[in-house]
Amino acid sequence: MRYDLVLLDFDGTFTDVEKEAGPFFEAYLADVREILGEGFERDWEEANAVLTADPANHGWLHEGRIVAPGNADPYLRATVIINMVLDRRGLYLDGDARTELLQGLYHRNYPKADTVFRPDAKRVVEALLESGIPTYVVTNSATHDVQAKIDRLAPRGRERLAVHGNAKKFFVVDPAPVDPRFAALPATMAVSGLGRPIYLRRGHYYEVLRHIWDETGVAPERTLVAGDIFELDLALPAHLGAHVQLVLKDRTEEFERQAMRQLANAETSDGLAGILARVGLD
Ligand SMILES: [Mg+2]
């Protein structure tokens, strides 16, 4: 086998996020109406238009940094738009209060989304689990929410698929403790054609990766990480020596493809079958 460990993102990688998010958006907007009152829709639509015109540069802003493109999935889009609306109205300007509000809105409404898997999801998960290669899901979503979705997929070998939720891949912060490997990471990556940096030192995500690498005894160089959003899922592990796979979708940004071209051991594929090909299981 080419790899001794496979780490998978979940939303957007195994699911079709645009198809499943309708009920999520409806419930999210109802919550926003509670907070902002009637008439917020015009601000919302204006912010949406600004975002849609340039998603790479109107990203998910966390603690003053853009940490992901704003249109990458409906969950991100909702967060980016509400951020713009709150900024415009001068509300929740304190960073911690803003984060708490946004995380609450997200986690409360995420379970209301439908579950729509990509074609091949079950077959690909089953093939990975059958191969005996340790395979984990590492996701920003809550562990039990994602476990419930995987239960619905019901792949053979389900019991061997561990889920690490709440990975906070967006959090640019030091891990505890900082170790030499993290200390050696550059702060940012420049992508040709993108006028902003990609932040690499995502210490919370790093803690999750380090935990899995410690637990399995596998080196980053023998690990394949697959995801659908370059800077959230792949930028950090790629700079730690892992091999990375970007699973494309309609809204994959050009800069994400470009970033992949700039890296060694980075490949893209239209669907999940590309993961099996990469691992050598097709
Ligand atoms: Mg994703």
Image (cartoon, rainbow, N blue to C red):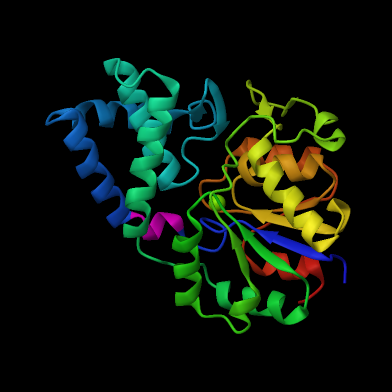
Q: Is residue 100 left or right of residue 180?
A: left
Closer-to-camera residue (254/93): 93
Give the x, y percent position of residue 220: 84, 52
Q: Does the magenta run of residues contain 19?
A: yes
Q: Residue at x 72, y 29 (%)?
A: 191
Q: Is residue 213 left or right of residue 128?
A: right
Asked which quadrant contains residue 234, the reply is top right
Q: Residue at x 77, y 33 (%)?
A: 178
Q: Is residue 139 left or right of residue 217?
A: left
Q: Residue at x 71, y 42 (%)?
A: 206
The answer to whether residue 212 is seen in the rendering is yes
Q: Main secondary structure of the magenta part?
A: helix
Q: Residue at x 28, y 45 (%)?
A: 28
Where is the N terminus found, in terms of image quarters?
bottom right
Q: Is residue 183 above or below residue 220?
A: above
Q: Does the magenta run of residues contain 199?
A: no
Q: Is residue 244 left or right of residue 54?
A: right
Q: Which residues are magenta?
A: 17-21
Give the x, y percent position of residue 127: 69, 79
The answer to whether residue 123 is seen in the rendering is no
Q: Is residue 116 above or below residue 221?
A: below
